[in-house]
Structure formats: C-alpha cells, structure tokens
Image (tube, helix red, strand yellow):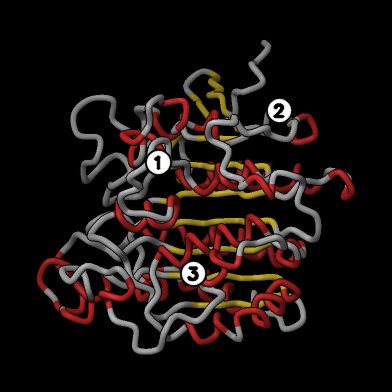
Amino acid sequence: MLVDDNIQAVVVRCGAQSKIVTRVSPPPSRIPEFVPPADTDTRPADLRSKITGTRPNVVFLFVDAMSHRQFYRRLKRTAEVLKTLHQPGKTHLTELYRYHSLGVSTDNSTKAMYVGAIDPGRTNPLPIWAYYRDRGYVTARVETSCEDWSTTYISQYHRSKRYSIGERSLDYELSSPFCMPEFYPATGNSFGNFKGPFSIIARCLYGRHVHEYGFDYIDQLRHELRSVEKSKRRPYMLMLNLMEGHEGTGEVLRTLDNRLSLFLEDLRSSGELEDTALFLLSDHGLHMGLNFAFLNSGQIEHRNPFFSMVLPAWLHEQVDSKGRQGLRLNEQRLTTPMETHFTLKTLANWPAYEDADFEKSLFNAVPAGRTCEQAGIGSRICKCKV
C-alpha cells in the first residue's frame, strides 16, 4: 500500500492488536527551502537575502500548566538530568525563578510567547514558527492534545484559515493521532476527568503513553535532520506540546518523567546541545484542584510557571557579552513569556538579529525591582498581590 508523502502516522492493525506507527515524510533532504508569500513575509526587506554565520537549532518543549515548584515535585529524574546539561565550555543552563504568567490559562501567555502580543490587533498574525520558516529553518510541531494552536488562538485575526494552519508555517506537523476516539472522545465531553487531554488518569493510546508518540516523532526527525551532510544541513526548530500537567490532581505529570529525562539525556550524550538551544518551559502553573482553589500558596504557584533554557557555550558567550550578563541577572528578576518571544525572535535571526528584539529578550537584563505593571502583568494575576 502506498501512503501519501504528507502522512506522518498510520494505525496498523493485526487481529485484535493495534499500534500507531509514525514516520518523517518527506525526508528532510527532499524539503525545499520555503519561499514566504509576499503578502505575509515576516522578513524586513534588508534581511531577505540568506543569513550567513553559525545559526543555532532550537528544540522547544512546552509542558502546559506546570509550575516551577511542580516541576521539582513531580519530575524528579528530569530535574536531576537537567542539572547535568550545564557543562562549562560546552553548554550553559539558565533557569528563571521569578518567571510570571500573563493570564489564568493558556491564552495570554502563549499569545505573548508565540505572537508577541496578547491581542495582536493586526491582520494575519503568524506564530513564531512561521518566523523561523521564513528564515530558512525546517520547522516542526507536535500537538499531543488534538489542538492546532494557531487555529484555536489566532485564526479569528485571519482573513483565510490558510494563514493559521500548518501549511503556511510548518514543514512537519503531527496532531491527528491524538484526535483518535480511543484517547480523545468523539462525543460528549472531550475534556473530562477520565479520558482526553485533561484526564486525571494516565493518558494512553494503544498501550503506550500519549507523550511517547510525540517524543518518538521528534526523535525520528532530529536524527534524520542531523544525518544530512553538514554542508547541506539546514537549521531546525522542533516543538513538542505536552499536556500531562493539565489536570486537577497534579499526579499525571509523574508519567512524563521517565521519557522526558531520557530525551534530555540523549540530547546531552549526542552532543546536539553544542549547536542547539533547548527550551523546557510552561505557560502557567496548575489552575485546578484544591491547592489552587483554596490556598494562597496554590495561587502563587499558578502564576510561577517553570522556565529553563540551555544554550551552546559559544552562543551563551556571545549573548552574555552583548547583554552584559543579562541572562544571569534575569534569573532572579520578574520576567514573562513576552521576553521569551523576543528571545526566540533574536535566535531566529542569529547572528543578524535586530537590536530592538535583543533589548526586549531574556538576553538583556530587565530592570531590578520591576513591577507587574511595568512587566505588562495585570493586577488581578500579579503574584505580588496574592
């Protein structure tokens, strides 16, 4: 049986047994460099020639609804492995201890992170992965919750849905396996307590944790991209969206620990982090359950999502010199997903970044004693006022 080039996953059945098989198709060597449509080209006129110089890859792991404290509480093995990613002379780990959400749920924080505005107020806004694709990156996104972020959060600003869906902004996209009724209910409540992406029990599909399929696909893609001859290899931005933190008990997140820690170990042992920027972060902490509903500590935790970033040593040295140790200073200063957006924009243009983006990124120190108002955090969500 011939399968269309654009199909990334199939269900294979043999008698009573079923399994999902993923693949990377077409192979990266057959992906032509994307030419942005003139009406939505995100590059300024003076940057439309090919960017030269060493360009970092980006691996972006997003765990919805995971606070800084919850990361250490539930992902103990991952936390230990994360420490080992700080290897002087090779890689540098940054963790933001006062990183602050911009809203109660996903909407505001991810719009700020991916579009650079909570209310874009413009026609056809494009997510950050389109920005990377326009600059020659191979882009991929895996959604493990049967949701297309662009369609859900910014399609209302588009004249045509073709601007929001992956066709415009992604070379590879995997989401359809996570819409199968065995995981995501086709009728009734898709976000109930016992089935679907908000379930309080382990999320499984054909005998495996749902997140395993996402990691498998990203691993396949990483290895294929890096198997291309170095002189012909293009930089890549790979994104994996994980939902294990989003449920009321706070326990399902534990199921992610083993596979996530193995993924980080592979990034370290393969040497990939010596040319790749790694983000492991969230949008907000847990916003359901008794702790959030009744305790002051739960309210504070909700506003303090986890954020970590690992940079190759050569890249860290360059941003540290330009930003006068901005990353180190920002570890204990009030930062938000808006700075994450400009960090991603700066990396997409590296080394021909725009100074205005750099100044608003995490590479540049935010003011000491910064207030919620100065950071664009609404008074109702400000953890300093809980």
Q: Residue at x 50, y 25 (%)?
A: 17
The residue that label 1 is drawn on is: 149
Q: Which class describes the residues within 10 Å of circle 2: few (<14), some (14-19), or many (20+)? A: some
Residue plotted at (30% across, 63% down): 102
Name the residue nearer the viewer: 333 or 87: 333
Query: What residue is rendered at 47% in x and 41% in y?
Result: 126
Q: Is residue 152 visible?
A: yes
- Using the image, determine if residue 315 lies above or below residue 127: below
Which picture quadrant has residue 189? Answer: top left
**Is 211 situated left or right of 4 in this image?**
left
How far apart, in angstroms, are the residues tagged by discs 3 and 1?
A: 24 Å
Question: Can residue 249 be spotted in the picture?
Answer: no
> Residue 150, how many percent across, how many down?
41, 39
Instruction: Decide which of 326, 280 is in the foreground and name it.
Output: 326
Q: Which residue is mark 3?
A: 360
Q: Residue under circle 2?
A: 26
Q: Look at the numbered disc 1 and give the secondary structure of its residue.
A: helix
